[in-house]
Image (cartoon, rainbow, N blue to C red):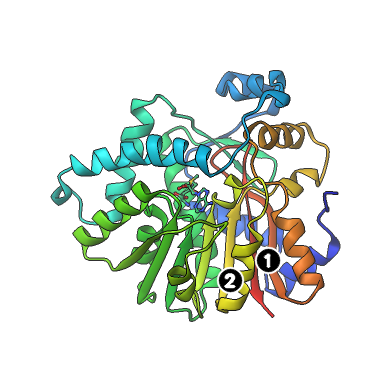
Amino acid sequence: MVKQRSEIDKNINSAMGITMDNLCEELFTFMRLDCYKEVALEELPYYTNWAERIVNADCSLNVKRNNEKVLAEYDIDKWEKVLDLLQNTYFSNFSNATDLFFYVHLSIMKSSKLVNTLISFADDHIIDVETDENREKCQYRFRSFFIKKFKQDAEVLVELGSGVGRNMFALLQEFPQFSAAACGDLSPTGVKCTQIVSEYFNTKVDAYVHDHYDPNPSLMGKCKDALVFTCQTIEQLPKVPEKLIQSLILARPHMVVHFEPVYEHAFINNRLLNLLRRKYTQIKDYNIDLFTYLLDLEKSKEIRIVCNEPHVYGNNIFNPLSVIVWKPC
Ligand SMILES: C[S@@+](CC[C@H](N)C(=O)[O-])C[C@H]1O[C@@H](n2cnc3c(N)ncnc32)[C@H](O)[C@@H]1O
């Protein structure tokens, strides 16, 4: 049974001084989007072939997502390409890791012709930001906007499911208050990329191979009093990794911020875009129960949810990121 957003969530956000209206306005200004145009839903097929693919997809044919599939998709395919680029890149051309990852990302996007300039914003605005560079910058700004709101006086930053580590480096560069950082990912290739970049720029990030289904104790040990975040990694697990959330509660982080697509949020209304989003999640076999599990933990007073904002920002309009922030009780 999928739970819907309630009035309580709005109250949670207001208690933190955040309301959807002022948040959107603030975030929109923060993104500094000076050139953009709104796109109507019926025009989507002219921008992306995913609209038609979703409509025509037969979900019963889907391959189930598990660690083996994730490793084939990331460890062997995507992060191998990044590793290859890192091993053949003149680092001295870049003054910091963020610029390097930006270059790596754009090179890979352009070589695989994946360029897409649409974003979704504040649930149902679809915006063409005209270049992939703009889109990538918006995503960075969106994440740092929320980290700024919730970091308070945490001194340690931890990312779970960090891929090649690009989020970590960008946030460490922007927020020097973090004196230590750690991250972990299922993909040993992703972890290797993080280590190479960390050594080159002399930015100390402890990177571990870690499985959300069976958390690495050394990484969990770094979470005490830390600002812990996840970004599009719980999405990869059809079933919420209860063991990870339980280990986090025991580790007593300062705050946990999820930038994740939340399936339950696609049930807020039955607008066409949300119907397409539900089917996209089913096609990919992405997570469907993170929010339901967190609400249960809140009911049993194990955690307190301090922010729940649906569909704030989407680099993929069919898989937008919600922001959920919680802390152990
Ligand atoms: C879409 S990528 C996001 C990476 C990174 N958070 C970012 O935003 O660039 C998803 C990542 O989740 C990782 N992942 C998937 N399942 C995992 C698991 N069971 N444990 C740890 N990491 C996992 C993948 O290896 C991949 O690096």
- Left or right: 200 as drawn, with respect to 182: left
Q: Nearer the viewer, mark 2 or mark 1?
A: 2
Is the residue 23 above or below the residue 268 in the image?
Answer: below
In the picture of the structure, the residue carrying the numbered disc 2 is 248
C-alpha gap between disc 2 and disc 1: 18 Å
Q: Is the shortest distance between ligand 1 and the CB of mark 1 under 8 Å?
A: no
Mark number for residue 292? none
Mark 2, residues whose alpha carbon is within 10 Å: few (<14), some, or many (≥20)? many
Q: Earlier in the sequence, mark 2 or mark 1?
A: 2
- Left or right: 141 as drawn, with respect to 261: left
Q: Indicate the position of residue 230 as horizontal and vertical percent values.
A: 53, 58
In depth, the one of 117 and 302 nearer the eye is: 302
What SS does tag 1 mark? Answer: strand
Is the residue 284 above or below the residue 14 in the image?
Answer: above
The residue at the point 22 percent across, 61 percent down is 199
The residue at the point 53 percent across, 44 percent down is 67
- From where the camera sits, is residue 32 visible? no
Q: How many marks?
A: 2
- From where the camera sits, is residue 50 visible? yes
In the picture of the structure, the residue carrying the numbered disc 1 is 307
Mark 1, residues whose alpha carbon is within 10 Å: few (<14), some, or many (≥20)? many
Res 213 → quadrant? bottom right
Quarter in which the C terminus is drawn? bottom right
Instruction: Kindly identify the amino acid type of the residue bearing the numbered disc 2.
Output: Leu
What SS does tag 2 mark? Answer: helix
Q: Indicate the position of residue 52 as horizontal and vertical percent values.
A: 65, 19
Instruction: Kindly identify the amino acid type of the residue bearing the numbered disc 1.
Output: Cys
Q: Indicate the position of residue 141 as horizontal and vertical percent values.
A: 47, 54
- Left or right: 116 as drawn, with respect to 308: left
The residue at the point 39 percent across, 34 percent down is 77
The residue at the point 80 percent across, 35 percent down is 271
